[in-house]
Image: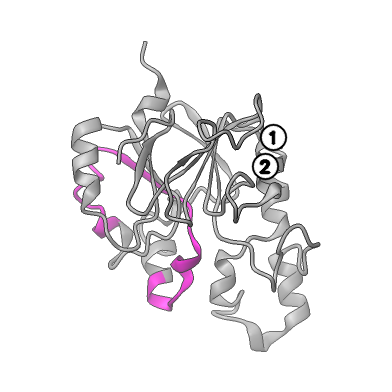
Amino acid sequence: MSNPLEHILICGDTHGRFDHLAWAVEAWQPRALIFTGDLAPTEPLELELAKLLPDTEVWFIHGNHDTDSDAGFDRLFNSALGDRNLHGRVVEIAGVRIAGLGGVFRQQIWMPPAEPAFRTPEEYLRRTGEGCRWRNGLPRRHYSSIFACDVGTLAQLRADILITHEAPSCHKHGFHVIDDLARAMQVKSIFHGHHHETHDYTLEGRLEAGHFDAYGIALHGIRRADGMLIV
């Protein structure tokens, strides 16, 4: 019986380039592709990936650059695949429970290990007033800011894999709060993007034994969900 992790590909930041995925889908025939953020599609995501959708499921978390412009926001969040955003929830994909934490920590909202300036989007809106709003909600860029409530919600759930844009503390620019979240959720592995670097932190000796495996995925990089490096 095959390992279900072999049928899921985790795709690093694409920044508008998706041509490398056709080869990966043809070669590996995955049941699902999951993006680690900063997709930055140049057209609505369902059109950008139209040739792949008949052959595989597509899921994602958002990154900081996915809120750089109104048009870029709409091409991802308001696309026909907008409901495939894993941020803040756990979804069973190809038989594997996968959680997502999209976005980045920002000083104006929360920069761990400091205490949050605002714990929830609602608190931010109450305290900042009408002049700060975009489309009657958060400022656009803060749709890719991590709030403490995002982490708190996930910490109550359980998953096999955690997909994040920010890195755990094994990266020099990572965060211990992501380690704590992974332990609370009892995940077996973390995959992150954002830094455009390839890492297997277990092989590099940067992880405590017995907690979780962790992997960094490079710009346009791909790993299988069992950690195997594809590109």
Question: Which disc, if any, is residue 183?
Answer: 1
Q: Among all residues in the image, which is located at the extreme bottom?
A: 131
104 on left or right of 151: left
Q: Are marks 2 and 1 in contact (CB under 8 Å)?
A: yes
Q: Among all residues in the image, which is located at the extreme top?
A: 1
Q: Residue at x 23, y 38 (%)?
A: 25
Q: Which element is circle 2 on?
A: helix
Residue 197: image x %, image y %? Answer: 43, 50
Q: Is 59 inside the magenta-drawn segment?
A: yes
Q: Amino acid at mark 1?
A: Arg
Q: Is residue 90 shown above or below 43?
A: above
214 on left or right of 69: right
Residue 49: image x %, image y %? Answer: 26, 53
Q: Is residue 68 shown above or below 180?
A: below
Magenta segment boundaries in residue numbering? 46-72
Q: Residue at x 32, y 32 (%)?
A: 31
Q: Residue at x 60, y 56 (%)?
A: 173
Mark 2 vs mark 1, CA separation in Å = 6 Å
Other-residue count near label 1 (Cα within 10 Å), few / some / many at <14 / 14–19 / ≥20: some
Residue 119: image x %, image y %? Answer: 76, 62
In the image, 70 versus 80, the foreground residue is 70
Residue 22: image x %, image y %? Answer: 20, 45
Q: Residue at x 61, y 52 (%)?
A: 174
Q: Among all residues in the image, which is located at the extreme right?
A: 115
Q: Which element is circle 1 on?
A: helix
| Residue bearing the label numbered 2 | 179
33 on left or right of 172: left
Q: Quadrant of the N terminus?
A: top left
Q: Amino acid at mark 2?
A: Asp
